[in-house]
Image (spheres, rainbow, N blue to C red):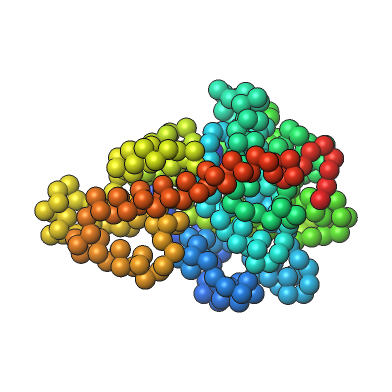
Amino acid sequence: MREDSNEFLVTPWEVRGKVDYARLVAEFGLTPLNQELYKRLTELAGGTHKLLRRRIFFAHRDLDWILDKYEQGEKFYLYTGRGPSGHTHLGHMVPWFLTKWLQDRFDVKLYFQMTDDEKFLFKPELTLEKTRRYALDNALDVIALGFNQDKTRIFLDTDYIGVLYKIALGCAKKITFSTVRATFGFTESSNIGQIFFTSIQAAPAFIESFISEKNVPCLIPLAVDQDPHFRVARDIAPKLGFYKPAIFHSKFLPSLSGAGKMSSSEAMSAIFTTDSPDAVRKKIWNAFTGGRPTIAEQKEKGGNPSICPVFYYYAFIFEEDDGALEERRLRCMSGDLLCGECKEELIGRIVEFLEEHQHKRERARDLLDKFLLKDEETF
Ligand code: TYM
């Protein structure tokens, strides 16, 4: 969606302004996750997840079809990814948390794509050496989340191109320049790698079907900025004889500065998995909130959690208990809970989470080889 008078923009490479998710649903042509499908998913999964209950995963394409197939005995596989342009921040992990839950609940394979090529092509300052280094670093975060070793493989595009290229070529042959220009806003001065790139991101959506020579359903959890790639992929799938991939869309964990999603290149806008407790403290204390300019005013009129990144950190990641989250929301709105207390508690929770995550990240170094797919390997 392009920017207009309401001032927001969502593309795979940039998110700006206050995102209006209802408008995105309409303009991207998504289907909201309704109560009936939520119920069916959680019944089949044998449980629920806060990202679903709170409709942070709020929309989909063909999730109902994936469940039909599952019930008919056609197991799906999961596919998601990361564009390694820096360290991982907590927003990146939002789709990965649900992906892990889905893998555990449905006992399915996961392909995880590291688009080191994409970040090289789209970020003038990045070399392939750097994007490779970030990809291997970011892979530690993926592994640290505890994905099933036997059922998960991570690949860098530049390592795994031997398999990807054949699929990407099939896609590229069906995608016109006019489609990518209209979908992604490319111009005469876009480099030709950028124009081709969507076919590389589409490839893993078909990889199991390509390798096994029979159609295998694919489910892709992501935040909604990545949807345009798969709109194109879904359009061409039937022409290639593949199933359309199903997509499950998350909202964005907002920037600590208040608007848009977080950015790998703006250190203060996000908490990175490598941040020290001091850095966390500084960032959260600096964060924009839904609070009032003075304590007296806050006590009298209350705060506004619906615009507050600190509140969203609790809702997306750091508060499991729905009752406690609602109580926090009401106490904020009534003026009973002040921003200082709310921030201090969040700092404690983030620091505790990161301490454990950073240990797991270190341990993940020994597992990296097992998770990485190279050359023509399959799994
Ligand atoms: P990247 O590296 O920009 O983002 C990785 C994943 O994180 C999501 N995301 C967020 N989710 C919630 N809150 C946020 N603030 C936030 N910021 C980013 C993204 O939507 C993405 O799911 N080209 C892709 C990498 C990729 C990929 C994929 C992603 C390759 N294949 C398949 C999803 C599915 C990229 O640069 O993602």
* Location of residue 373 by image quarter: top right
Q: Nearer the viewer, residue 340 or 245?
A: 340
Percent of width and height locating residue 343: 30, 50
* Along the line of sight, the residue nearer the viewer: 41 or 310: 310
Q: Is residue 222 left or right of residue 326?
A: right
| Residue 307, horizontal then vertical, whole percent | 32, 53
Residue 69 in picture, x, y percent from top left: 74, 70
| 194 left or right, relative to 328 | right
Left or right position of 279 against 375: left
The image shows residue 140, relative to residue 305, as above or below, that is above
Identify the residue at image location x=68%, y=66%.
106
Q: Is residue 37 visible?
A: no
Depth check, front residue: 89 or 182: 89
Is residue 72 something that shows in the picture? yes
Residue 272 left/right relative to 229: left
**Residue 313: image location, x then y, percent:** 40, 53
Q: Residue at x 42, y 38 (%)?
A: 276
In the figure, residue 201 lies in which quadrant? top right
* Residue drawn at point x = 88 percent, y = 55 percent: 213
Number of labelled discs? 0
Q: Please, is residue 332 above or below residue 116 in the view?
A: below
Which residue sits at x=33%, y=57%?
306
